[in-house]
Structures are given as structure tokens and as C-alpha cells.
């Protein structure tokens, strides 16, 4: 270990649960955080500071003022600079720890790219805010044999669970036994709109901090082979003081994903896809499986139809037809001012194509 590493991690190496051997394993590990909002920033912050050797942060979105109340890696300068979340987070964390590799990837995680994004990871952390991406991650992690940690926070409460697929149990340090998967724990994916969201029920920072602290510790245990893992679905509420473990991590013998290896989310089609961004009066539209957009030439084309086209290396912001557009190089547009997916797709077809 380098002199700088010995100094940097000295306090956590004194902790007997970890020691110098545990630190070596963290430095040799690779973690991928999918989603960089409230939970994703808190998780990435912990992972970079504890010294995970390679950290990849993936997020599709840009930063808004109402994020700063809980998304701890962002500040007002990032908003002024129109930085995407993944890039802003990576910059902050490189400034915190220049001895590790931090990579920020601005992308929507979907069936067409999830395998490439997580392949080779020691552990994957869920920083998303929706179940369709979590069930996709579950498919991908079971298929590749990668351990992952689920985290969800709403209002003042949240949940976390740790999953160790077959391949991961053999590959991870320590004596880990395989567990069930997300589908074993929760069953079929909850339909959209079935559960409250941060946009409808709100969310407070202390709830995020509590749940993500547990999830980050779980990742630390997975990467080092030390400590007891969370055995089920840990539910905690900072407002009402509820702390309980619901369900168990036991595998269901009839599970479609981890017993029968049918990956319905991973096998989903590619093409032009859209999703309504809950509570934001905005729709995301994307062509999946196409090459990257040339932002410079698109910005020039939009000059004739748009008001106030602004561009940096990561995105274009423009007002077109009275809607606020944010366009990313991965063929993605977030169109604000409508929640109607059909309307958004036709706007997308008109100004971007696809
Ligand atoms: Zn399962």
C-alpha cells in the first residue's frame, strides 16, 4: 500500500472489522452505482471516501435546484454550469480522492447497455428511483453473477436489501452463501404508480442518510468478505422510529429470474422508448441502440426553431414549441412541459428524428 493510502485510510484500518487486509480488498474492488440522485450521491460519496479502487457512476439526468436539499454531491455552481449529475458527481469525488479511478457516465440504463455498464464489477449499488430499472438490474446481476444492494427511500422511510447470486457467492472474498434475488423478495414488479414516489410523498435528507449508510456498509462487507450481511428487507423510518427486517433473503425455488434464469427485463426490445418522469411534468424519449448524437450539429439545426439554445460538452438546453428540452449525446431528450408520452414522442421525432 502506498504511503498516501496508509495515511488516508488509517482510521478505518484501525477498525478491527476491516484492517489493512480489508482496505487492500477495497482498493482492488470495482463498484458501479446506477443512478445518482439522493441515494446514489450518498452511496458514491461513501464508496469514494472508503477507497474503492474503481468507481463508476451512471445517471441520465441533470441537476435541478430542488435536488440540493438531499443530493449531497451537488451545489449551485453545478446547476449554473448545466452539468449532468454523473459528471458533477465524478468531479466532486475525484477532488475528494485522487488515488482512485472515478468514472461518470451520462446514460439511461436500459436493456441495451446494462450488461456492458456492470460487467466486471465486484458490487453494484442501486441508486435509482424506479422498479423497472431495479428489475432490469436484478436480471443483469443474476445473469452475470454480481452481488448488488437495493436501496429505496421515500418520505422519512426507506428499505435496503443485499443480493448474492450464485456466481457472486463463489467470486466474492469470504465465505458468502448465495441468496434469493429481488424477485424472490418482492415478487412481480409493482405496476407504475402503485407505490408513492418522492414527487408525491416527498423525501427528507435524514431518511436518505440513514438507509444509504446501511447500504454502503453492505457494499463494504461484500467487497472485503467481512461482516454479517443484512438477511432480508431492512425497513427503517427516521420519523416514527421503526426499524425492522421484513421478509427474508431466501431463494424461491420457482423464481423466474434466479431459479429459471428467464430474464424478461433484459430481453426487452430496443428502439424508441419513452417514460414519463413522475411528478415533473416531463417525459424522457430515447432511441436505444443507435449511435451517439452530434450535439454541435444538432444545436446548429435547432437555432432556427428554438429560443435560447445553450450547449456544453454534455447536453443542449433549448426552448422549442414552448417546451423546455434537455438533449444528451446518447440520443435522449427530456422534454419538460408535458406528461403525455405520445405528444413527447412526436415532438422528439419532429426535432431529433428516430
Ligand atoms: Zn429470485
Image (cartoon, rainbow, N blue to C red):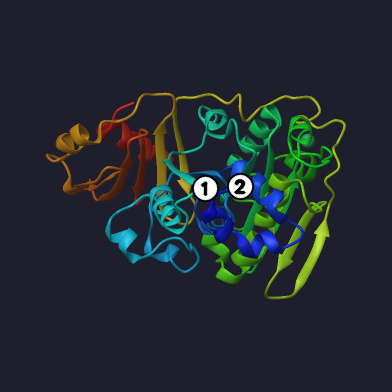
Residue drawn at x 59%, y 50% as measured from the top left: 193
**Dot 2 alpha-carbon crowd within 10 angstroms: few under 14, some 14 to 19, many 20 or more:** many
Q: Quadrant of residue 119?
A: top right
Q: Which residue is mark 1?
A: 35
At horizontal 62% and vertical 30% (from top left) the residue drawn is: 265
| Up-down relation of residue 42 to residue 105 (above or below) | below
In the image, what residue occupies the spot 40% across and 34% down? 286
Nearest the viewer among 78 and 156 is: 78
Kindly state the secondary structure of the residue where label 1 is placed: loop
The Cα atoms of the two marked residues, 1 and 2, are separated by 7 Å
Between residue 153 and residue 89, name the one nearer to us: 89
Q: Indicate the quadrant where residue 254 lies.
A: top right
Q: Position of residue 282 (x, y in %)?
A: 40, 50
Q: Residue 118 in the image: state x and y as whole percent.
A: 57, 34
Does dot 2 land on a helix, a strand or a loop?
Answer: strand
Residue under label 2: 126
- Mark 1 touches mark 2? (CB < 8 Å): yes
In this picture, residue 178 sits left or right of residue 122: right
Q: Position of residue 92 (x, y in %)?
A: 41, 57
Amino acid at each position: 500500500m502506498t504511503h498516501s493510502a496508509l495515511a488516508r485510510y488509517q482510521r478505518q484500518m484501525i477498525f478491527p472489522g476491516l484492517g489493512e487486509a480489508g482496505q487492500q480488498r477495497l482498493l482492488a474492488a470495482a463498484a458501479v452505482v446506477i443512478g445518482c440522485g439522493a441515494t446514489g450521491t450518498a452511496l458514491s460519496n461513501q464508496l469514494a471516501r472508503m477507497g474503492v479502487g474503481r468507481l463508476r457512476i451512471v445517471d441520465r439526468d441533470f441537476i435541478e435546484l430542488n435536488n440540493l436539499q438531499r443530493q449531497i454531491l451537488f451545489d449551485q455552481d453545478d446547476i449554473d454550469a448545466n452539468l449532468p449529475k454523473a459528471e458533477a458527481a465524478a468531479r466532486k469525488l475525484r477532488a475528494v480522492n485522487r488515488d482512485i479511478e472515478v468514472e461518470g457516465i451520462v446514460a439511461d440504463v436500459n436493456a441495451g447497455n446494462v450488461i456492458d455498464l456492470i460487467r466486471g464489477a465486484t458490487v453494484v449499488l442501486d441508486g435509482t428511483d424506479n422498479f423497472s430499472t431495479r428489475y432490469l438490474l436484478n436480471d443483469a446481476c443474476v445473469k452475470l453473477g454480481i452481488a448488488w444492494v437495493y436501496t429505496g427511500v421515500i418520505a422519512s422511510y426507506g428499505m435496503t436489501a443485499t443480493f448474492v447470486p450464485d456466481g457472486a457467492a463463489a467470486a466474492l472474498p469470504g465465505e458468502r452463501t448465495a441468496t434469493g434475488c429481488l424477485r424472490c423478495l418482492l415478487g412481480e414488479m409493482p405496476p407504475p404508480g402503485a407505490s408513492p414516489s418522492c414527487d408525491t410523498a416527498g423525501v427528507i435528507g435524514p431518511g436518505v442518510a440513514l438507509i444509504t449508510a446501511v447500504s454502503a456498509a453492505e457494499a463494504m462487507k461484500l467487497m472485503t468478505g467481512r461482516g454479517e450481511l443484512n438477511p432480508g428487507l431492512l425497513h427503517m423510518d427516521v420519523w416514527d422510529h421503526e426499524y425492522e427486517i421484513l421478509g427474508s433473503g431466501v431463494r424461491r425455488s420457482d423464481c423466474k429470474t434466479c431459479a429459471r434464469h428467464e430474464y424478461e427485463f433484459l430481453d426487452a426490445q430496443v428502439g424508441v422508448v419513452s417514460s414519463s418522469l413522475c411528478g415533473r411534468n416531463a417525459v424522457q424519449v430515447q432511441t436505444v441502440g443507435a449511435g451517439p448524437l452530434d450535439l454541435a450539429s444538432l444545436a446548429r439545426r435547432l437555432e432556427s426553431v428554438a429560443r435560447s439554445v445553450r450547449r456544453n460538452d454534455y447536453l443542449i438546453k433549448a426552448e422549442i414549441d414552448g417546451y423546455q428540452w434537455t438533449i444528451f449525446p446518447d440520443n435522449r431528450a427530456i422534454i419538460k412541459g408535458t406528461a403525455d408520452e405520445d405528444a413527447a414522442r412526436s415532438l422528439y421525432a419532429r426535432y431529433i428524428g428516430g
